[in-house]
Image (cartoon, rainbow, N blue to C red):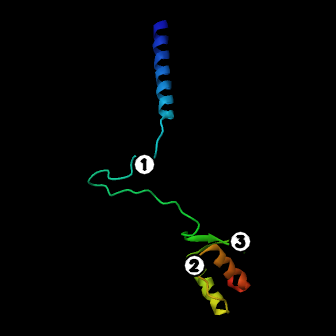
């Protein structure tokens, strides 16, 4: 009975040691980047999204999220009622367009 218990303890201790060793291994995250074989394409690192190249922006004027299409529609309405031309889809321009005239906000 004692030999079975010691054998079980040894197996458990080995598994715990292997798990601890697994947890302590560092993974860099770049192991799969690059050519993986003839049937796989090249994989590159995804670029982080900065503040300007986004497809949506949240406005401080009404706390809604606007897409580029919604911004473009509001911007066209802004120009029709006498707004000055703005350049680019960014938070400052969106807030300028929305605060220029309250009827622009849907």
Q: Where does residue 37 sit, x and y in percent of width and height? A: 28, 51
Residue name at image x 57 percent, y 78 percent: 88
User: N-terminal of the two: label 3 or label 2?
Assistant: 3
Q: Are marks 2 and 1 in contact (CB under 8 Å)?
A: no
Q: Nearer the viewer, mark 3 or mark 2?
A: 2
Q: Residue at x 52, y 60 (%)?
A: 48
Query: Could you tell me which secondary element the residue under label 3 belongs to?
Result: loop
Disc 3 and disc 2: Cα gap in Å? 17 Å
Please give the label number shown on residue 30. 1
Kind of element beneath mark 1? loop
- Precedes in sequence: disc 3 or disc 1: 1
Side (left or right) of 45 relative to 62: left
Residue assigned mark 3: 60
Name the side, left or right, on which 35 lies relative to 88: left
Q: Which mark is residue 88?
A: 2
Query: Furthest residue to the left?
Result: 38
The residue positioned 47% from the left and 33% from the top of the image is: 22
Dot 1, crowdedness within 10 Å: few (<14), some or many (≥20)? Answer: few
Label 3 Cα neighbours within 10 Å, binned few <14 / some 14-19 / many ≥20: some
Examine the rendered structure and indicate whether residue 15 appears above or below residue 70: above
Q: Would you place residue 47 above or below residue 66 in this image?
A: above
**How far apart in space, not on screen, are marks 3 and 1 (Cα)?**
38 Å
> Residue at (71%, 86%) from the top-left corner?
103
Q: Position of residue 20 (x, y in %)?
A: 51, 29
Q: From the viewer's perspective, is 66 left or right of 48? A: right
* Tally of marks: 3
């Amino acid at each position: 009975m004692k030999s079975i218990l010691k054998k079980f303890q040894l197996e458990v201790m080995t598994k715990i040691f292997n798990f601890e060793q697994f947890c302590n291994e560092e993974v860099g995250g770049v192991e799969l980047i690059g050519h993986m074989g003839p049937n796989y394409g090249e994989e590159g690192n995804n670029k982080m999204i900065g503040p300007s190249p986004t497809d949506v922006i949240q406005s401080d004027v009404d706390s809604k999220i606007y897409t580029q299409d919604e911004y473009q529609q509001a911007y066209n309405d802004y120009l029709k009622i006498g707004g000055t031309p703005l350049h680019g889809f960014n938070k400052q321009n969106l807030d300028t367009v929305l605060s220029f005239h309250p009827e622009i906000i849907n």
